[in-house]
Amino acid sequence: MKIDIAEQVSHLFAEIDRQTQVFQAATGLYCPPGCGKCCDNEHIEVTVLDCLPLAIELFEAGEGEFWLGQFTEPTRDSCLFYQADALNAGNGRCLQYVGRPLLCRTFGFGTVRNKAGAPELAVCSVHRATQAETVARSQQLIAEGLSAPNFADLAMQLEAIDPAIGRQHYPINQAMRRALERVGFQRQWA
């Protein structure tokens, strides 16, 4: 593994964040403050490559071994970086928001292609319930040509950086553990 692979992923993530911000500004679609429903999910799958920049950052901050221990024997299936709000069910926050994987960056603001190949907004249930008009307007703007991040296109861009670790998806805690192991091992032998 070379650091430049992680830098390429970080550059892709920065571009995804920019695209998402442009999309949000054009549509007015946003996540409700404090909402964490999408994060409190046992079925999130990402790649080791998704987690690589964060794994490097954690080791550079002296936290890699701690988190490797946490991910080696996780206490739950949902992401260990998600901290639920004890006072408000459904709310919470990501302890590593800046380093989050691709899916976490695009969820609720990305598109999928329908059977005809046209992009359709893939919003979460909270968006549909709390911002139905904004969701409908956003979908109309996409149909009229507004650019929005596309899950499949972005996944292919990510995979192209390093197919060996960018193709296979794992449950998020397992992918993070594998990334931490990879970085830790390479730091030992560097």
Image (cartoon, rainbow, N blue to C red):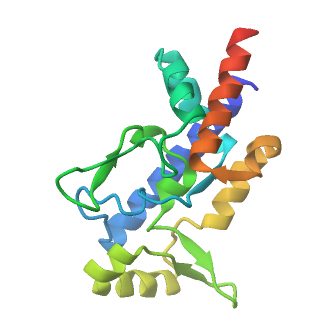
Comparing 81 with 10, the one in front is 81
Q: Quadrant of residue 190?
A: top right
Q: Quadrant of the N terminus?
A: top right
Residue situated furthest left in the rendering: 87
Residue reaching furthest right?
164
Quick check: 157 left or right of 81?
Answer: right
| Residue 131 in view (yes/no) | no
Residue at image x 67%, y 23%? Answer: 183
- Residue 25 image offset from top left, x and y in percent: 33, 65
Residue depicted at 48% across the width and 47% down the height: 76
Image: 74 above or below 157: above
* Left or right, residue 75 beside residue 181: left
- Going 47% across and 60% down the picture, which residue do you hit? 41
Measuring from the top left, give residue 64's x and y in whole percent.
53, 21
Give above or below for 32 relative to 157. below
Residue 10 visible in the current orientation: yes
> What percent of the width, then of the height, locates residue 46?
63, 52
Q: At 39% from the left edge and 58% from the top edge, which residue is drawn?
A: 21
Count of labels in the image: 0
Residue at the far bottom in the pictured view? 116
Whether residue 67 is situated above or below residue 112 in the rendered picture: above
Q: In this view of the protein, which residue sits in the foreground, 82 or 139?
A: 82
